[in-house]
């Protein structure tokens, strides 16, 4: 390596200064992707870019490696990655720090100087005792660095997994040691641990854009830019979305549906950029937040207690009647009282006073009646909301089976077609129908939240009619998919009909229902938005 004092800034020429992008400088990220990757939100005037975690690692991190390969730094890939992460992926910052004080930079980043890959040892050992977990292993893998702090692979893998959510350089397990575990080495530790638990170890290098340490850093970098980036809330989805044009207002109180910034990740999951929740149309954001809070808190539990229990006159604890006798004994304070009038039971031994009218009783009964009505109304909409939530999970299982059948369908058609050629258009209708069913079911689920907060108007009844039409179409399409995957279908067995023939039999119905669901979902949302804007529909909260 050349003497550092002889290096000049002219030795480093970046091909394009515009390519130097800070992960926090989101305004410049649009330079890294083609225009066709930018999409427009359906109900808000914003343009967004769907990102996958791998793509982010490629574009915003790994692309900087080439900018450090020029000049006389002679940095290895391992050194470059560690230095870039420490300097927030700014190659010019790495160059300046190297020229200014390289030993100090390496010390801050936890890299030994001079650097060598031989400083990191992952090896199998016999009869090893780990000083962290105090386990005696007949045979296990261990890891150590130049510092000499050696521990079993299980402890190191657990430590790495816990450190990933910080999204920063991972140091040695010893609290007094500052050496950094490089990205490829960290991934190898995790891979060896995973594979050793499954009975075998194959030391295969993982591509850098799948490196778990880099993916974790990307996730943390995105989480810090909540004004421009939002992670997809779907389960097990690591994708996210960036706003590249337009602005999402933080105000959630606007009743207009058109202000809901619905976006879609690269895997097709739709969600609200503002709420960070799934696509909740036709509900505005503020209604969605009220519903989520209502379902999460204890307000309805309190209503149920008020409507179905009495308070003990002794300790004031709630009591639920579980028998026919009105002689109650509190299990807490052992107070004996009458369930009807709440009076002391000692006054009821020879003479019941419950038949006498008291002026405060009608008011108490009216309050309890209102509580019951409020509770019943909430349970009506909540039950249907949950049923469609559960049905969505069931539809996903059915859809997975239908997709499998679709692949088999293509193989069957390829065999049955004389020239062996099969066009994807032959079963494309299945994919379109699956998307329509999923979106329709989700829209239907949120219409019950919309209806719960909707005030009593004639136009509200029209909304319920549209809701009913959508329900009919969704259930009919769901039923067809169930019949396709049902192995016990007697009609299929009787006619010896293949799955392919059954799919083609329902093709026209599937296409029609798919189109109807899309149309009715769109009409229902447009109707809600238009009438909210015109004051014909109003929320009563």
Image (cartoon, rainbow, N blue to C red):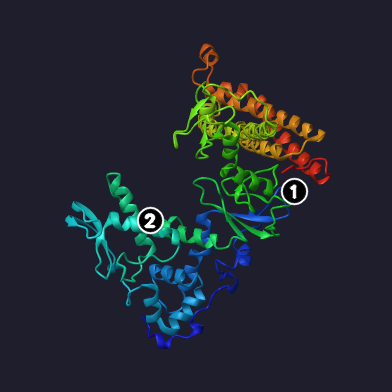
Q: Is residue 400 left or right of residue 208?
A: right
Figure check: 519 above or below 156: above
Task: Answer whether labels 2 and 1 touch (C-beta < 8 Å).
Answer: no
Residue 415 shows in the view: no
Q: Is residue 413 left or right of residue 358?
A: left
* Residue that carries the numbered disc 2 in the rendered image: 161
Return the residue found at the far left. 127
Residue at 51%, 84% (x, y): give it.
10
Q: Residue 80's spot in the image, x, y percent? A: 42, 70
Figure check: 148 above or below 319: below
Q: Nearer the viewer, residue 422 or 83?
A: 83
* Residue that carries the numbered disc 1 in the rendered image: 255
Say which quarter of the image contains residue 483. top right
Residue at 73%, 54% (x, y): give it.
45
Q: Residues within 10 Å of mark 1 (few under 14, many from 20)?
A: some
Figure check: 395 above or below 506: below
Q: Residue 374's spot in the image, x, y percent? A: 66, 35
Residue at 58%, 49% (x, y): give it.
266
Q: Is residue 231 left or right of residue 248?
A: left
* Labels 2, 1: front one: 1
Q: Residue 451's spot in the image, x, y percent? A: 71, 37
Query: Dividing the image into 4 quarters, which one contains the N terminus?
Result: bottom left
For numbered disc 2, what is the local secondary structure? Answer: helix
């Amino acid at each position: 390596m050349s003497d550092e004092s002889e290096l000049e800034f002219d030795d480093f020429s970046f091909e394009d200064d515009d390519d130097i992008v800070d992960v926090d400088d989101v305004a410049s990220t649009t330079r890294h992707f083609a225009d066709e990757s930018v999409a427009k939100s359906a109900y808000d005037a914003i343009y967004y870019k769907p990102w996958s975690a791998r793509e982010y690692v490629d574009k915003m991190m790994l692309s900087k490696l080439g900018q450090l390969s020029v000049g006389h730094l002679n940095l290895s890939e391992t050194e470059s990655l560690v230095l870039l992460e420490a300097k927030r992926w700014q190659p010019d910052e790495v160059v300046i720090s190297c020229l200014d004080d390289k030993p100090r930079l390496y010390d801050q980043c936890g890299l030994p100087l001079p650097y060598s890959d031989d400083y990191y040892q992952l090896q199998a050992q016999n009869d090893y005792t780990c000083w962290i977990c105090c386990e005696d292993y007949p045979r296990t893998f261990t890891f150590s660095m130049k510092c000499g702090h050696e521990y079993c692979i299980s402890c190191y893998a657990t430590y790495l997994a816990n450190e990933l959510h910080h999204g920063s350089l991972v140091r040695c397990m010893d609290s007094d040691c500052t050496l950094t575990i490089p990205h490829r080495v960290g991934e190898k530790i995790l891979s060896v641990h995973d594979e050793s638990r499954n009975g075998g170890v194959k030391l295969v290098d993982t591509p850098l854009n799948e490196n778990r340490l880099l993916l974790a850093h990307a996730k943390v970098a995105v989480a810090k830019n909540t004004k421009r980036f939002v992670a997809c809330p779907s389960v097990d989805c690591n994708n996210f979305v960036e706003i590249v044009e337009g602005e999402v207002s933080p105000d959630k109180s606007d009743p207009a549906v058109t202000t809901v910034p619905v976006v879609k990740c690269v895997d097709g999951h739709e969600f609200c950029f503002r709420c960070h929740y799934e696509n909740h149309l036709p509900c505005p954001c503020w209604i969605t937040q009220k519903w989520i809070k209502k379902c999460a808190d204890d307000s309805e539990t309190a209503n149920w207690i008020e409507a179905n229990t009495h308070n003990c006159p002794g300790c004031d604890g709630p009591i639920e009647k579980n028998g026919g006798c009105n002689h109650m004994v509190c299990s807490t304070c052992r107070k004996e009282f009458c369930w009807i009038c709440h009076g002391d039971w000692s006054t009821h031994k020879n003479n019941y006073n419950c038949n006498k009218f008291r002026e405060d009783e009608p008011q108490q009964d009216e309050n309890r009646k209102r509580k019951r009505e409020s509770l019943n109304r909430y349970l009506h909409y909540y039950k249907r909301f949950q049923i469609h939530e559960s049905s969505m999970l069931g539809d996903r299982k059915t859809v997975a089976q239908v997709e499998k059948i679709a692949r088999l369908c293509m193989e069957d058609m390829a065999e049955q077609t004389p020239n062996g050629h099969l066009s994807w258009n032959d079963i494309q209708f299945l994919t379109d129908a699956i998307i329509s069913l999923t979106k329709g079911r989700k829209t239907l689920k949120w219409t019950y939240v919309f209806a719960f907060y909707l005030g009593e108007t004639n136009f509200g009844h029209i909304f319920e009619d549209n809701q009913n039409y959508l329900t009919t179409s969704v259930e009919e399409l769901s039923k067809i998919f169930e019949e396709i995957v049902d192995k016990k279908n007697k009609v299929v067995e009787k006619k010896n009909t293949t799955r392919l023939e059954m799919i083609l039999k329902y093709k026209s119905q599937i296409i029609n229902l798919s189109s109807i669901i899309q149309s009715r979902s769109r009409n229902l949302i447009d109707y809600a938005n238009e009438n909210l804007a015109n004051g014909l529909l109003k929320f009563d909260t």
